[in-house]
Amino acid sequence: MSDEGLAVIGVTSCNQELGLHPFNVVGEKYLLAIADATKAWPLVIPSLGHCPAESILPRLDGVLFTGSPSNIEPHHFQGQPSAAGTDHDPKRDATTLPLLKAAIDAGVPVLAICRGFQEMNVVYGGTLHQKLHELDGYIEHREDKTKPVEVQYGISHEVQIEPGGLLHEAWGRSSAEVNSVHTQGVDRLGVGLRPEAFASDGLVEAFSINNAKNFALGVQWHPEWRVLDNPFYTSIFKLFSDACVRRARNRVR
């Protein structure tokens, strides 16, 4: 596809104070994953606390909902108040939760990663465990923050992939190895979400949406990390890219 017909993928951002001013920021790894592993170009969507979805979605060929250091405020899923010091981003919640549902309803391809995956579960009525490491029966899903970033985002555990889903279509195998950089996880799965992969402890690590109009996949791990060095991660972005390119072609006709 030429630059003139390049698909455009919106990428959600987070709020962060840098010096004396608030900024909207997005990890470069997400932007590079789109630029390097898809036939598309990233366009940052600011988290301003609102989003005119009806105006911007017709101009996008896909949306990537990113991970974040922040957690969804628990009142969005009727959870208990967060522990003191928990990082939240209420403007992101107010932007991305309605945007995600609007994108899926409009048939815009969606890939949701880590926090984005949790946002998708909450949007469909699911709930979250806020501290998996404090619950019996779960493996360690957190990264070791004392290690270099390459180790933190290195392979952590295996997931079992459900047959007949988007992940199996992308990868063609029943298992894969993934990184693990999260504290929260799915408690109750949202209505209409189809499990796509499980960790060995039974935690849902990926899901899609039953009867979605277009590609809609959420994954708890970080496939954007050095995506071209990992064939499994690359396969996910390829399937997402294919859906975005199809929409781009139909949109410009």
Image (cartoon, rainbow, N blue to C red):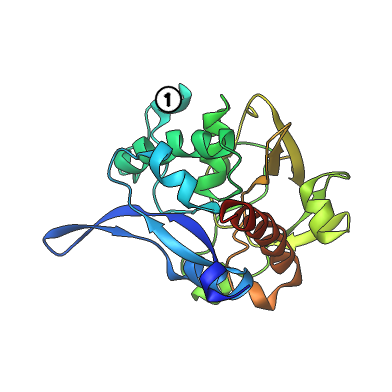
Between 15 and 239, the one nearer to me in the picture: 239
Measured as percent of width and height from the top left, residue 216 is found at: 65, 44
Q: Quadrant of residue 231?
A: bottom right
- Would residue 79 be found to the left or right of residue 48 on screen? right
Q: Residue at x 50, y 76 (%)?
A: 148
Residue 116 vs 82, above or below: the answer is below
Tag 1 residue: 80
Q: Residue at x 68, y 67 (%)?
A: 155
- Quadrant containing the C terminus is bottom right
Q: Secondary structure at mark 1?
A: loop
Give left or right: position of 250 versus 74.
right
Q: Residues within 10 Å of mark 1 (few under 14, many from 20)?
A: few
Instruction: Establish if 160 lies above or below 101.
Output: below
Q: Position of residue 179 (x, y in %)?
A: 64, 62
Q: Quadrant of residue 19?
A: bottom left
Q: Residue at x 57, y 27 (%)?
A: 124
The outermost residue toward the left is 20
